[in-house]
Amino acid sequence: MANYDIDLVVTSAPHIRDKVTTTSIMRDVIIALTPALIGSIFIFGIRALIVVLVSVVSSVLAEVVGNLLFHKKPSLNDLSASVTGLLLAMTLPPSSPWWMVVIGAFSGILLGKMIFGGIGSNPFNPALVGRAVLMVSWPTQMTTWVKPFSAFNQPLDVITTATPLNVVKLQGYAQLLSEFGTKANLYKALFLGTIGGSLGETSALLLLIGGIYLIARKVIDWKIPVIYIATVFVLSPLFGRDPLFSILAGGLFLGAFFMATDYSSSPITPLGKVYYAIFIGFLTVLIRQFGSYPEGVMFSILLGNAVVPYFDKIMPRVYGVFPKKEVAK
Amino acid sequence: MKVFTYSPGGVHPDESKLTKDLPFEVFNAPPIAVIPLQQHTGAPNTPTVKVGDYVKVGQKIGDSTQVVSAPVHATVSGKVIAIEERLCPTGAKVQSVVIENDYKDDWVELTPRSSFEDLSGEELVKIIREKGIVGLGGAAFPTAVKLTPPKGKVIDTIIGNGAECEPYLTVDHRNMLEYPEKIIKGILIEMKITGAKKGIIAVEENKIDAANVLQNKINELGVKDVEVVLVKTKYPQGGEKQLIKAVLGREVPSGGLPLDVGVVVQNVGTLKAITEAVLEDKPLIERGVTVSGNAVSKPGNYIIRIGTPASFIIETLGLNRKLRKLIFGGPMTGIAQSTVDVPVLKGTSGILMFGDEALEMAPEEESPCIRCASCVDSCPMGLMPVLIDHASRKNDLKTAESLHALDCIECGVCSYVCPAKRHLTENIKKVKQAIIKQRKIEAAKQAAFEKLKAQRMKEKENSQKEVKNG
């Protein structure tokens, strides 16, 4: 055997692995977010881009700080910090001051993720933790919205507007309809995103494109977004709300496709996912109806995150293990 | 034609069936054959020859009186030069008979039969046992034992397993293309033995040519009760439990066997070997092996004598790069070897040779679990691999057991899909072994306790007697 060069490595089976990696999954999420990000820059101007850049850079920085603080291995190459930065930016008003964005990113990464042990160990969605911190700390700045297409020609602090959900909360659906003229106009504006709101949540269309991409790439399961949105659609009329308006307005599409599907803060069992989606859909409708905030997506997902360990107890049936009834036969 | 499958779970790795169009070639017999005395699941054999004996091809060289066993036969003619422990591809050291080939290919006398119809089921089982037939799909369970169900168990269906879902492997595919008649007769023999009314040969969709060849042969032979069905190409479609679910919709109960749902599943290569044993009187001395991978110069399907060392196969076929990984079996469940000095066994379906790329194909380094649930969604047994893995890492046997760790079929799918490249299958295997070990210890403790109790009772009785007598 001297003729051959042999240096054997012994590992356990399987000896081949799928090409998908944590990094490739995160890259797919970034790709999926791109249409909505470009849309937001188109709608809200350069301010949106600045918010995005500040958010991503400070999230990455926060990850580095977290790694040093908690003596963890460098984890930047998994791209998860960048994803958190992008998602946080999408939930912020385009007029957010840079220091607020930095605080949001550091809170999200450090309090929402690193103290729990880093990627995969966080019980709550880090981007939403960041947003929640900002929401309760600077409620005025967090609910100051700029009119779409206004940033190019007018000073930002002059032009403010209300989100459609805000108008409904304060003045009623009739007032909103009168602003848009017809229902069709309203739906169109919501679908395309030419309305006031957080920078990445306004266009249902662009978020849907990203969501479909993620489902097609098998990065996310269709169950959570579809059932979440369907639950809101079905429950809204019970409270006298326009169902189509309810699913298109606010952060529902962003939350459904990109936040509620966050791996580490959502259930891992197939049936658990279904109940979780129904649960947060129910909470969203309740908060919008009875809560003091017009929007209910963020808090409903965070509350849903807290209950995930229970949803995870709904395990699939094991092959060859039958319910007791069948055994009795 | 309807395509059957099971759900949930399964994956579809790159098929890499590089050798599917290469017909079987007979491999040269090795100068030295190393034949382990235990090549099956069950009790080891004791040698029936001594060092210095001259043996003929097909001569029995090891047997056991235990029920779960299968004898082994000499695969070359020549002198027994050693009977000693040798390393097996399974990683165990096994008592082996080492024969120096005299290249005379001197066979024991065989008495072929023209038909099996006039033999009884018992006689057929006896032949299958004597000829050393074991499952050739990889598990190497003694076939005669599989065909002798305990009283009260009724077998209604024999499933010929032509799924061959492991990437790279093509022996079953070639067997179906080249020996359809032997496979069909093998199923008929098993139906006769078990009284099963129906035979089904399940073939994966990517081997539709084999399905057609088998169907044509069935028509030609005028066989009534055997049909060919297509199953979806996915891994592990060829797992016994998955195949039964796909084809018959039945589920083997947890901890049970296929015969609990009236089924015997048999690899097509085994069916061929059964026919050869019964009609040609031929013992299992060789088998089809796929030799593949990017490091071997002449990949192909070869009929290789059992006991042929991997080193001889490498010398014969040549390498085109540095050999970094030598796998016995398929890439999903096969065993990586630490040395080329291991022989082909009855259960060796493939020998895969890879260069450096192999190390990238299965990275060693794990990253944190991101709870993506891929392992949950693709587990063909409906288990929660991630949770069993957590329990295994904490050595929490109780939790692992409650998560049905023992139902794991060790197919490797969870590790395969894991984006964090975590060693799920490996850890689940570990915790399974720990659970089984603990059960044994507990059973032994219980037995010791019972024994002690009995002893005490006896002592008490004796002392009472003494008191009475005194």
Image: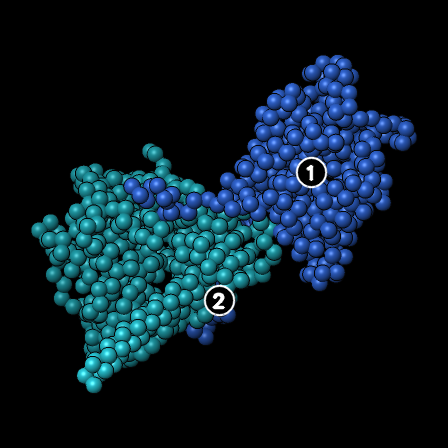
Identify the secondary structure beneath mark 2: loop
- Kindly identify which numbered label has been placed on residue B129: none
**Residue A265 pos. (x, y %):** 62, 46
Q: How many marks?
A: 2
Query: Do pointers 1 and 2 mark residues of a single chain?
Result: yes
Residue B315 visible from this viewpoint: no
Q: Left or right of B182: which side holds A231?
A: right
**Residue A230 pos. (x, y %):** 58, 28
Chain for numbered disc 2: A
The correct choice, above or below, for B422 with respect to A195 in the image is below
Local packing at callout 1 (Cα closer than 10 Å; few below 14, some 14-19, many 20+) is some
Q: Which corner quadrant holds the N terminus of chain A?
A: bottom left
Colour scheme of this structure image?
by chain
**Residue A242 pos. (x, y %):** 65, 20
Between the residue at mark 1 and the residue at mark 2, the CA separation in whole angstroms equals 49 Å
Residue situated in front as seen by the camera: B189 or A126:
A126
Q: What chain is colored cyan?
A: B
Q: What chain is colored blue?
A: A
Quadrant of res B48: bottom left
Q: Residue at x 43, y 61 (%)?
A: B432
Q: Which residue is mark 2?
A: A10
Residue situated in front as seen by the camera: A84 or A9:
A84
Quadrant of res A116: bottom right
Badge 1 vs badge 2, beta-carbon distance below 8 Å: no
Mark 1 vs 2, N-terminal side: 2
Q: Which residue is mark 1?
A: A299
